[in-house]
Amino acid sequence: MIKIRYVFLTIVAFAVVGLSSCNFGNEAANNSPTPNVTSETQVVEKAKNEEARDVDYMTKLALMKGHMIVGKELLDLNKPKQAEPHIGHPVEEIYADVEEELEKRQVKEFKTGLDDLHNLVKLKPSDPEIATNFASSMKAIDDAIAVVPEDKRKNPAFILQTINGLLDTANSEYGAAIAKDKIVEDIEYQDSRGFVLYAQELYDGIAEQMTKNNPQANKEIKTAMTDLIKAWPAAIAPEKPVKSPDEVNKLVKNIEQNVQSTISS
């Protein structure tokens, strides 16, 4: 939220002996009210802040989607114990951070639905209601995303910033999952997989525009993304990582550099 501070200039007129009528006229002009005009700089700054706010909102919801995507993969593999933390993370780790924005944007509360789904997976992993609740929870997240103006959701420069946020988080999670050339934290491995899968989905939605308007960046990003996803061959983590954290980091940084060049162009 931008706070625009208005500065009022107080002009003090000094009486001078023998002022001419011309001087009185100047004094009157000097004491005329200063126009209250919003400067071009303020307009630009406001737009930047609104853009940052929308990117942050979109990124948090995208992280929710990433958690849910890998959670669903694990449910489909009949691994409810492994799925449970991923189903729980959207409500336990993210919802509170985005709740105020949801209210401001008049998005219907969906924390209750996420809680209900999490409890079912944790306490009744065979309950057929899980599929229904999962679908309604995913729809609720998609509905929350849909309040972002459509022109932004279709704008590569906007979506690329969200992709950067997903990949940056995935990079950190992947690094935390590995020690001594072994995957020692399955949850972090799976989290990062979900984030990269959703980043790929988002990129697919803008790939046509990127091919047309930024062909070189598109080629670099698609090549790096194709190589990056190889680090997560499946939802169930392999014992030995396919790619080292350094290799993943290098690919993510390559994508981020091309994203930045696209946004700046």
Image (cartoon, rainbow, N blue to C red):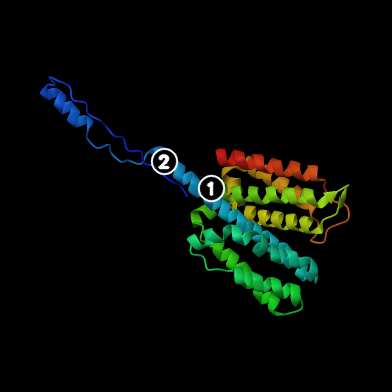
How far apart marks 2 and 1 lie (CA) works out to 15 Å
Question: Which residue: 48% across, 64% down?
Answer: 106
Tell me if I can see residue 243 in this picture. Answer: yes
Question: Which residue: 32% across, 38% down?
Answer: 8
- Tell me the amino acid under the disc marked 1: Ala
Question: Which residue: 83% across, 50% down?
Answer: 178
Quick check: 137 above or below 159?
below
Quick check: 44 above or below 189?
above
Give residue 77's quadrant in the image: bottom right
The residue wearing badge 1 is 52
The crowd level at tag 1 (other Cα within 10 Å; few <14, some 14-19, many 20+) is: some
264 left or right of 24 in image: right
Q: Nearer the viewer, residue 49 or 259?
A: 49
24 left or right of 157 in image: left
Secondary structure category for the residue under label 1: helix
Q: What label sits on residue 144 in the rendered view?
A: none
The crowd level at tag 2 (other Cα within 10 Å; few <14, some 14-19, many 20+) is: few
Badge 2 or badge 1: first in the primary sequence = 2
- Tell me the amino acid under the disc marked 2: Gln
Please provide percent x and percent y for residue 179.
85, 48
Q: What label sits on residue 42 in the rendered view?
A: 2
Q: Nearer the viewer, residue 52 or 223?
A: 52
Please provide percent x and percent y for residue 244.
82, 45
